[in-house]
Image (cartoon, rainbow, N blue to C red):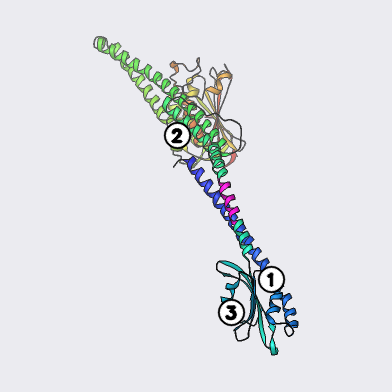
Amino acid sequence: MKLQTKINLYSAVMFIVLLLIINTSIYFTFSRMMFDSELKRVTGEVKQTVPGISQAKASIPIKDLLRAHMPVNSMLQIVNADGTPGPAVTSTGQEMLREAPVTFTNKEQKKIVEYTNTPYAFVSIPIIWNDGEVAELQLTQSLESTANNLTILKFVLSAITILASIPVFFSARLLSNFIVSPIKSLIKTMKEVQESGHYKRIELRKQSKDELYQLGETFNNMIGQLELNHEKQEQFISNASHELKTPLTVIEAYANLLKRRGKEAPELFDESVEAIQMESHRMKDLIEQFLLLAKHDEQWKVEQKEIQLNSFIEESIRSFRAAFKREIQLKTMEDITIKTDSQKLKQIFYILMDNAQKYSDAPIQVNIRMMNQKALIEIIDQGIGIPKEELEKVFDRFYRVEESRSRKSGGFGLGLSLAKELADVINAEINLISKEGSGTTAQLKIETGLSSNSHNESV
């Protein structure tokens, strides 16, 4: 069953059921009020009759006396103490009331009874009868007119229910159209996107705070994000293909050269092997960075532990100095202890150090200090720097500043992007401060615990 049909059916049924409950309540409440009012009226008439009958019973025949006090459409009779019926008079058309059973209760009684499907008000009041004997004066009066009024009320309420149900179906349809229309538009747009492969947004008529507007707005935002991710994916694939194509072309060229002349020229053989080996290393590094960058944030496995930052950086610098034969100066202001993932921190540090040694032959300066309750690691090189307009782009994948990140330097434009993602994983922050021609300072800020024992050291 379609959602629109469900809304039509459920809203119409609920409204009709509610209307039936209300009208039924009105009918029974009004019926109770009318019968209570009639019963109260009849009781008053009987109580007014009792004194007149008691005073005149000796001088006027009892039937004449009863007939004189009998209301219309009723029966007035005396019931003896032994339960036998006494004198009784009835109005025209009410003779069948004589056949009704009689009882003596010796107390005032009033109720609604029914004879031949007609409601009657029955009132019984004790009176002093002949020789001081206690009897009961009982009045049974027809409430047929009241019943007829209630029947008319029943028909009126039933008609109202039926007539009110007609606009209910139309209003339910309008409501379902109002609710389902944005959903239909959403489904249509999604099918168009699925069939055409082009991202498309739904049209939002006017700004609103209801859930339907929020649904459309959320869908448009999602489409925008998917479109952006798709563009980034296409760009990533294009750049990756381009980056892999170059080393493969070099390897293929040297392999063909070896095939043709490698056996005849030993120096050419050595050159070709060295070039192939170098390009293979470049491809291996590039693929490793691809694999790391392909991870989503939730897939990074973070193992935090407490480390002494100064000793950790000193050890990393010793390894880096041995690998690249570079002069590195370390300056620390205080002992700093942090809790982080040491492997990822070391990877970030190596990426920043690798950038510093690629684009500058001067000594590299590393500073460790506290700033705003965070541990700050600064890596300062004396290279050619980065133009101001390029600083915001250097963290994009495959982006390389034209002058400084040439293929001669061996960079892929992935290092800083990977470092940024790793920093986000361990809740750290990377900033670059640079001026063209004056070098670059890479800052890594990390949440820390305590600090003490200020000292200076140069390595």
Residue 236's place in the image compared with 26, above or below, is above
Image vertical order of residue 99 relative to residue 295, above or below: below
Quickly name the residue at label 1. Answer: 71
Q: Mark 2: few, some, or many residues within 10 Å (few <14, many ≥20)?
A: few
For badge 1, the amino acid type reads: Pro
The residues bearing labels 2 and 1 have C-alpha atoms spaced at a distance of: 95 Å
Badge 2 is on which residue? 296
Mark seen at residue 233: none
Is the magenta region chiefly helix, strand or loop? helix
Mark nearer the viewer, 1 or 3: 1
- Would you say 175 lies left or right of 342 here? right
Q: Amino acid at mark 3?
A: Val
Find numbered disc 1 in the image and state the secondary structure of the residue it sits on: loop
Magenta segment: 153-165
Q: Amino acid at mark 2?
A: His
Q: Nearer the viewer, mark 2 or mark 3?
A: 3
